[in-house]
């Protein structure tokens, strides 16, 4: 019987091979199947596996090839993986929400709670936005910033806007007789959908800040 440590080593080696192919730009359509096969064999997901899938997304495989696997990959049990990756994104963005700081980690746990409360349609779109954020991180080393802005960031902003507008529309229908301000007329929790507008603004700021630094 294979020990747990040996199994973990085999898993990391299999994922590591795929990740190296991703970072070198050598991934192809068949690697999606390879990544999910490894996940099924070892019964868990790792950061390396998600790096592979996001790199594939950067190469244009997101909609056509990852959709069949989304049901198994983006379930509520995987939110901890998203939180760890959001910490990486926030660190790179300059917020430094990483490490053992309990107050900062609690902010990430609150994000998980808000995702759990979303309806399935909004949840799928929200997670797609998170995917695109990581696509930017993965692809940044292999593509120029101009290409990223023109192809990836606008799609992320459009998806965020769809969630915010559609979510607010539904909430207004449910609370049409309420005297509450519009940002509290949400289907599940106050401020949920305006948060998406805020994230879109952060992305715009980061985009122009990076462009300004490159121009300088």
Image (cartoon, grey):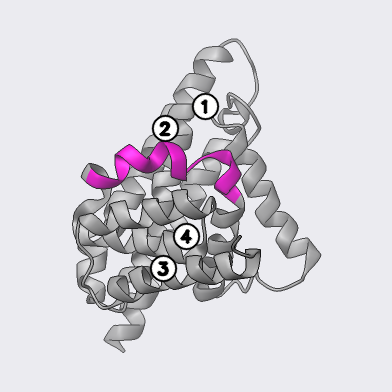
| Structural crowding at the residue carrying mark 4, measured as other residues with C-alpha within 10 Å and reported as few (<14), some (14–19) or many (≥20) | few
* Pointer 3 local density, CA inside 10 Å: few below 14, some 14–19, many at least 20: some
If you read the primary sequence from the N terminus, does the residue marked by circle 3 or circle 2 appear first?
A: 3
* Residue 127 placement, left or right of 103: left
Looking at this view, name the residue that lies furthest to the top.
Answer: 177
Query: Helix or strand or loop: what does disc 2 sit on?
Result: helix
Residue 138 among those drawn in magenta: no
Q: Which residue is mark 1?
A: 119
Per the image, the residue denoted by label 4 is 202
Judge whether 8 appears above or below 76 on screen.
below
Q: Which residue is mark 3?
A: 14
Q: Which residues are magenta?
A: 65-79
Q: Earlier in the sequence, mark 2 or mark 1?
A: 1
Please report the residue visible at 55 percent of the width from the left and 31 percent of the height from the top.
118
Q: Residue at x 72, y 61 (%)?
A: 105
Gap in angstroms between the C-alphas marked 1 and 3: 35 Å
Circles 1 and 3: CB atoms closer than 8 Å: no
Sequence-first tag of 4 and 3? 3
For residue 200, say whether it is visible: no
């Amino acid at each position: 019987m294979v020990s747990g440590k040996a199994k973990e080593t085999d898993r990391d080696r299999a994922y590591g091979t795929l990740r190296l192919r991703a970072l070198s730009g050598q991934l192809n359509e068949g690697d999606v199947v390879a990544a999910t096969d490894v996940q099924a064999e070892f019964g868990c997901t790792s950061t390396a596996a998600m790096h592979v899938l996001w790199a594939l997304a950067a190469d244009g495989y997101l909609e056509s090839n990852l959709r069949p696997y989304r049901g198994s990959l983006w379930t509520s049990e995987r939110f901890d993986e998203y939180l760890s990756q959001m910490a990486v994104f926030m660190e790179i963005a300059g917020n430094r929400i990483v490490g053992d700081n309990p107050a900062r980690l609690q902010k990430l746990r609150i994000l998980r709670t808000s995702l759990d409360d979303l309806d399935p349609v909004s949840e799928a779109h929200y997670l797609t936005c998170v995917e695109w954020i990581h696509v930017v991180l993965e692809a940044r080393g292999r593509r120029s910033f101009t290409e990223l802005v023109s192809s990836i960031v606008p799609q992320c902003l459009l998806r965020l806007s769809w969630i915010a507008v559609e979510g607010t529309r539904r909430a207004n229908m449910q609370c049409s007789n309420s005297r509450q301000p519009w940002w509290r007329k949400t289907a599940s929790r106050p401020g949920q959908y305006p948060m998406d507008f805020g994230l879109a603004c952060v992305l715009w700021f980061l985009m122009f800040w990076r462009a300004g630094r490159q121009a300088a």
